[in-house]
Image (cartoon, grey):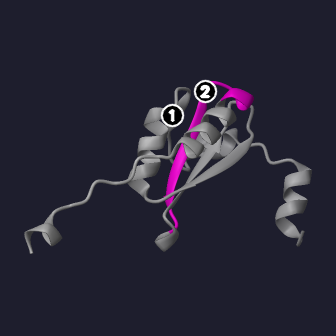
Amino acid sequence: MAEENEKTQPAEPTGRQLAAAREFVAKHGEAGRAVVENIGRAGARVMLVGKDGAIGDVIVTSVETGEKLVEAVDGLEASTWDNETVGATKIGAKYRRRMASPR
């Protein structure tokens, strides 16, 4: 019974998740932002916004894991979808078409 009441530690980000976030920062500027969003049972989505305005994401198992990912990657700053972060994004025509139509 005591084991059921103990909080489990959130999973650490995987090497693949860390590599994806580090690659994004390397390609899109050292002053990137990261917004961690709960996506329900699937876990959490870490939305990345590069210094150049590019966007990307990494899916992790929980919000806590996403926060650990942001802390572990040099060049990422934890953020929210405030005016400054939204204004920093640059979504090009190619990406807009991709979002609007089936592949």
User: Residue 28's quadrant in the figure?
Assistant: top right
Label 1, residues with CA under 10 Å away: few <14, some 14-19, many ≥20: some
Residue that badge 1 annotates:
77
Examine the rendered structure and indicate whether residue 3 appears above or below residue 10: below
Q: Position of residue 87 (x, y in %)?
A: 68, 42
Type of the residue with mark 1: Glu
Q: Quadrant of the N terminus?
A: bottom left
Type of the residue with mark 2: Ala
Magenta-span inclusion, residue 35: yes
Residue that badge 2 annotates:
31
Q: Residue at x 90, y 61 (%)?
A: 97
Q: Position of residue 20 (x, y in %)?
A: 64, 41
| Whether label 2 touches label 1, CB < 8 Å | yes
Question: What whole-number distance in Å separates the C-alpha atoms at marks 2 and 1?
Answer: 7 Å
Label of residue 39 in the image: none
Q: Quadrant of the C terminus?
A: bottom right
Q: Which of 41 and 51 lies nearest the eye of the viewer?
A: 41
Q: Element at badge 1?
A: strand
Magenta-span inclusion, residue 38: yes
> Left or right: 78 with respect to 88?
left
Q: Earlier in the sequence, mark 2 or mark 1?
A: 2
In the current view of this chain or complex, which residue is farthest to the left?
2
Q: Position of residue 32 (x, y in %)?
A: 61, 33
Q: Residue at x 43, y 56 (%)?
A: 63
Q: Residue at x 47, y 73 (%)?
A: 41
Examine the rendered structure and indicate whether residue 47 appears above or below residue 39: above
- Range covered by the magenta-colored residues: 26-39
